[in-house]
Amino acid sequence: MGNISLIIPAAGVGKRFSNNIKKQFYEFDNQPIIYWTIKRLFESYNFNELIIGVNDEDISYIEEILKNLSLNNVLVKYAKGGKERVHTVLNCVNTAGCDYVAVHDSIRPFVGDETIKNVINKGFETSAAICGIPVRDTMKKCDDDKILSTIPRDNMFLAHTPQVFKRDILIKALNNALENNIIVTDEASACEYMGIPVSMVLSNYENIKVTYTEDIDLINLIKNKFF
């Protein structure tokens, strides 16, 4: 087993959610989503340190949020938020002091205990692992409102977080993506581009990414199962 840093990129604006508030700071049960996300992760695993990628103007607010969490004297670090997620995550990984890192979206507050433990163990075993769920629905490729083709859903997964990597591997992969102007929407895709094998373990279906205001209804349905 290795030592592991938990990385939470929290510098996004989240315009698809609201123009008035960053979605990671939207409150339910009197606490912002990022509070519940961090609480959920530390209830399930003893991470060695917490690194939050954040814009300077939000650090004081994050510090107030963390005061309400019992993190058992876990070392907390802040990394500068970047233009895109990949820049923020790279800043966080460069700040990490552990051999492994787990990157988790700030707006996924319902990741399950088994998901967290399984993806971390697989990451320790293989050096690169993510969690995800099999695609249930028929998939269509479209051009505007016209269907171009049906995509076979066999072996198709929706990628979730946490995503766990050996630190030096992820640094190389993210730098390589930036140097080659490769658009990466998650950390695994940077590794895939370099030909680094990435393992997949099952996630839980409640591990939703809060993206739209309509997702608030789902939050209220799911929250009592976890908190």
Image (cartoon, grey):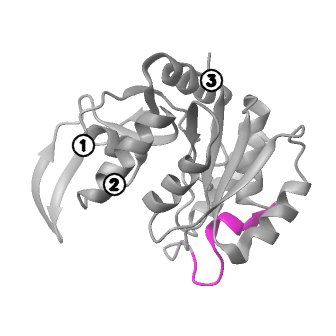
Q: Quadrant of residue 13?
A: bottom right
Count of marks placed on residues: 3
**Regarding mark 1 in the picture, which secondary structure is present there?**
helix
Residue 193 numbered mark, or none: 1
Kindly identify the residue that appears in the image at 25 percent across and 39 percent down.
Answer: 194
Residue 184 numbered mark, or none: 2
Residues at discs 2 and 3 in contact (Cβ within 8 Å): no
Q: Is residue 121 visible?
A: yes
| 173 displayed left or right of 79 | left
Residue 112 % position (x, y):
64, 32
Residue 103 to residue 47: above or below:
below
Residue range in magenta is 18-28
* Of pointers 1 and 3, the one earlier in the residue sequence: 3
Residue 44 numbered mark, or none: none
* Of pointers 2 and 1, the one earlier in the residue sequence: 2
Q: Amino acid at mark 1?
A: Tyr
Q: Amino acid at mark 3?
A: Lys
Kindly identify the residue that appears in the image at 26 percent across and 28 percent down.
Answer: 155
Kindly identify the residue that appears in the image at 30 percent across and 49 percent down.
Answer: 176
Q: For the C terminus, which image quadrant? A: top right
Residue 200 % position (x, y):
40, 27
In this view, the residue in front, 197 or 159, is: 197
Q: Amino acid at mark 2?
A: Val
